[in-house]
Image: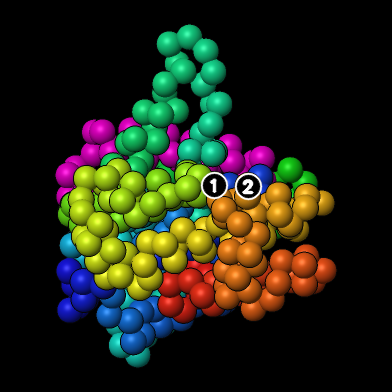
Amino acid sequence: MGKGKKSKIEFRYYKLPMGVPVLALLGNEWIQTYGDGIDYLHFHNCMEIGYCYYGQGTLSIGEKDYHFSGEQFSVIPQNCPHTTTSDPGTLSRWEYIFIDAEEILKNLYTSGNNENKDGWIIQNVNSRGAFFNVSDMPDAAGKILQALDIIRNKEVFYLEEAKGILIAFLAELARNNVDGPQDTLYMDYGRFNMLVSDALEYINSHYMEPIRIETLAGHCHISETHIRRLFSSCINMGPLEYINLIRIKNACELLRKTDALVADIAFKCGFSTLSTFNRNFKRVTGCTPYEWRKNPENFEQQIMKFEIHPENGW
C-alpha cells in the first residue's frame, strides 16, 4: 500500500438520485491537492470512473500504486479500496462519474441466449480496478469525456444519451478486462475487505428484515466477535449501528416521497417497534420523523454527519 497508507479503510457513500444511476462531480471544485492529510484508503457503494486532466501524484488501488500526470483515467469497482494523493504543493484536476453499473445494464438483454450478457459485463467490469493512459485506450477515454460533457451541459434527454455512452464504455472495458494485460489488475485486497463488502451488501438487501449479528456473521462464515471487529476497523461503527443507519436512510426516502403512516414506515424499514424507530431516527437526524417530514431539507447531509467520518461521498 503506497505512501504509508494505514490499514484503516473508510466507506464513502454516494446517494444517487432516485431513478438516475449516474452522478457526476464536475468543475473547478475538483481542481485541488488530493489526499492532503489523509493516510488511509476508502471505498464507495458504486463504481467510480475518474478522468485526470493534469496534475502529479499517486493513485492507490488496493495494494498497487500508479503515478498519474494527466491524460489518464481510472475505473474503480464498487467496494474496491483506493485513494488519490497529489504530490505536495501541486494541484490536480480530476472529474468523476459515479454509476450504478447494474442498474445501467439492467434489461439490456431480455431474451434468448443474450439474457445473461449483462451479468457477464458486470462480472468483468467489477473484476479489477484499472488505471489507463488515454493513449492506450483512446476510444474509451473519448466516451468518458463525452459522457462528462453531456452531463455538464444537461440538454434535453441528456441522461438517456449519457447512459447509452456509458453502456458502450462498460462493454469496451469488459472486453479489455478479458483480453487486456494483467498489470491493470488491482491486487486482491484480501478476504478481510471482501467480508466487509459481503456484509454491507447483505445489510443493504435485508435491512427491512430482522437482522441478528449472529445471522450476519453466519452469512460471512465468521464469528460474531470477528464481524464486530471488521466493522469497527473498517467503517468505525458497529454492525447494528450500520444496520440502523441504512434503515433510517430508507425511512427518510419514504417519509419524503409517500404519505404512509410513520408507524408503517418504521415497520417497513425493519424496526420492530415505533419507539425504537423514533429513538434511532432522532439520534441520526437530530429530529423526530414528524418534524423531519415537515422540513426534509438536506436530509442526506444530516444523516451523513453520523456516517463513517467526514462526509457524504468525497
Please give the name of the residue rendered at 23% of the width and 39% of the height, measured from the top-left corner. Answer: 180
Q: Is residue 37 above or below residue 302?
A: below
Quadrant location of the N terminus in the rendered image: bottom left
Q: Is residue 178 magenta?
A: yes
Q: How is the image coloured?
A: rainbow
Q: Quadrant of residue 255?
A: bottom right
Mark 1 secondary-structure assignment: loop
Position in image of residue 112 (x %, y %): 48, 9
Tell me the crowding category of disc 2: few under 14, some 14 to 19, or many 20 or more residues within 10 angstroms, Cα based: some
Q: Amino acid at mark 2?
A: Lys
Q: Is residue 96 visible?
A: no
Element on which disc 2 rests: helix
**Residue 159 higher or lower than 278, as above or below:** above
Residue situated in front as seen by the camera: 201 or 244: 244
- Can you tell which quarter of the image residue 134 is in? bottom left
Q: Which residues are magenta?
A: 159-186
Q: How many marks?
A: 2
Judge whether residue 228 is colored magenta: no
Task: State the residue in front, 266 or 246.
Answer: 266
Q: Mark 2 highlights which residue?
A: 268
Q: Name the residue at 54% across, 77% down.
A: 305
From the top left corner, tell me how far across and down residue 211 is, in percent: 43, 49
Cβ–Cβ under 8 Å for marks 2 and 1: yes
Task: Point out which mark residue 208 bears.
Answer: 1
Query: Would residue 234 appear left or right of 182 to someone viewing this image?
Result: right
Label 1 Cα neighbours within 10 Å, binned few <14 / some 14-19 / many ≥20:
some
Residue 162, percent from left and from top: 61, 45
